């Protein structure tokens, strides 16, 4: 949002703030969409069972086949989860399902030894039920069609990918689903408002002050020559150092160096690290960094 505001004066702070909140919500929708895909992949075993049942010359494997992947109690705990189903409906995520993707992923997974072993196991344990679902989800996420489906749903998929994949793996490992399991993955007010929205507002309100702190540390660099993303990251980091007393200073430095690796140039990591390290020591010496909690000043 900060980058967009710097590029287009018509894109106001109020517009950016609303879009920020919308984008946060899209991250949660991506998680829900992945949950729905997991259900649909498993549900395709019903179609598989139907196709096998109408074969003129069914094999013994066809005759013994059951849609146990969908009947899996862990999947059913999601299917019957009222809150999740309400979210899926409210966001109309059913309309976002790519049925070719569902068929392709299931068909590929049906050939895997882990699925064959699962079908042959008369009474799989919960651990075995989880393992087959983890393998199914891994099969899906390795598919180019899956990547395309996620990108079609949201342009921010690549930004949210690691977050969503991590949340999905934690979810599957914790199945069967409890009543409020999804709340661990739904961005809360502390994160979205108390931190994110407040950081955004401070950056907007104190832009000149933050620039004034950064410019003297640039030495032979003109501020106008600093990459736009790098300057934004420096301002965000300084703002966090000064105005967020519960976040350790070293955490701020390390996190913004990591962010620069993702969003800026190859040389930005060393540039950001050097400037922030210098500024952090200067601001600490001036007493402008006041952290709460034992050891947070270090």
Image: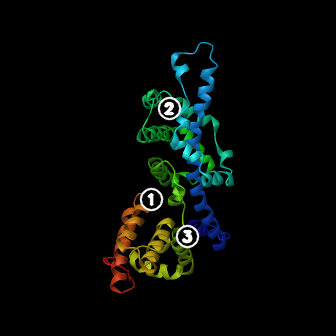
Q: Mark 1 or 3, which is nearer the eye?
A: 3
Q: Name the residue tied to disc 2.
A: 109
Instruction: Examine the rendered structure and indicate whether residue 54 appears above or below residue 122.
Output: above
Q: Secondary structure at mark 1?
A: loop
Q: Residues within 10 Å of mark 3 (few under 14, many from 20)?
A: few
Question: Residue 273 location in percent, x, y?
Answer: 36, 67
Q: Mark 2 or 1, which is nearer the eye?
A: 2
Residue 225 visible to an observer of this rendering? no
Instruction: Examine the rendered structure and indicate whether residue 175 appears above or below residue 259.
Output: above
Q: Residues within 10 Å of mark 1 (few under 14, many from 20)?
A: few
Along the viewing direction, whichever of 111 and 290 lies nearer the viewer: 111
Instruction: Examine the rendered structure and indicate whether residue 81 appears above or below residue 229.
Output: above
Q: In the image, what residue occupies the spot 51% across and 52% down?
A: 164
Distance from label 2 to label 1 (Cα)? Answer: 39 Å
Question: Residue 198 location in percent, x, y?
Answer: 54, 75
Along the viewing direction, whichever of 19 and 224 lies nearer the viewer: 19
Q: In the image, what residue occupies the spot 38% across and 72% down?
A: 276
Q: Name the residue tied to disc 1.
A: 265
The label on residue 189 is 3
Q: In the image, what residue occupies the spot 44% across and 48% down?
A: 173
Along the viewing direction, whichever of 63 and 256 lies nearer the viewer: 63
């Amino acid at each position: 949002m900060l980058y967009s505001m710097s590029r287009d004066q018509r894109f106001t702070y109020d517009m950016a703030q609303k879009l920020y909140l919308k984008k946060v919500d899209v991250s949660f929708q991506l998680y829900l969409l992945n949950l729905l895909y997991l259900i649909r992949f498993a549900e395709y075993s019903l179609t598989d069972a139907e196709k096998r049942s109408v074969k003129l010359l069914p094999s013994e494997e066809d005759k013994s086949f059951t849609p146990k992947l969908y009947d899996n109690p862990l999947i059913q705990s999601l299917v019957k989860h009222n809150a999740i189903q309400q979210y899926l409906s409210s966001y109309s995520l059913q309309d976002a399902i790519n049925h070719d993707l569902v068929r392709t992923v299931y068909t590929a997974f049906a050939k895997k030894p882990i699925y064959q072993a699962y079908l042959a196991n008369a009474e799989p344990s919960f651990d075995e039920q989880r393992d087959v679902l983890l393998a199914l989800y891994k099969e899906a996420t390795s598919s180019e069609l899956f990547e395309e489906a996620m990108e079609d749903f949201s342009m921010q998929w690549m930004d949210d990918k690691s977050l969503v994949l991590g949340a999905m793996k934690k979810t599957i490992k914790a199945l069967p689903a409890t009543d409020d399991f999804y709340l661990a993955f739904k961005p809360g007010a502390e994160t979205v408002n108390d931190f994110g929205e407040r950081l955004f507002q401070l950056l907007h309100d104190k832009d000149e002050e933050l620039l004034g702190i950064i410019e003297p540390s640039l030495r032979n660099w003109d501020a106008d020559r600093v990459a736009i993303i790098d300057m934004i990251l420096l301002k965000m980091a300084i703002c966090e150092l000064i105005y967020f007393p519960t976040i350790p200073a070293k955490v701020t430095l390390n996190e913004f160096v990591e962010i620069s690796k993702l969003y800026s140039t190859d040389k930005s990591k060393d540039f950001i690290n050097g400037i922030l390290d210098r500024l952090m020591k200067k601001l600490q010496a001036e007493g402008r960094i006041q952290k709460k909690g034992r050891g947070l000043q270090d």
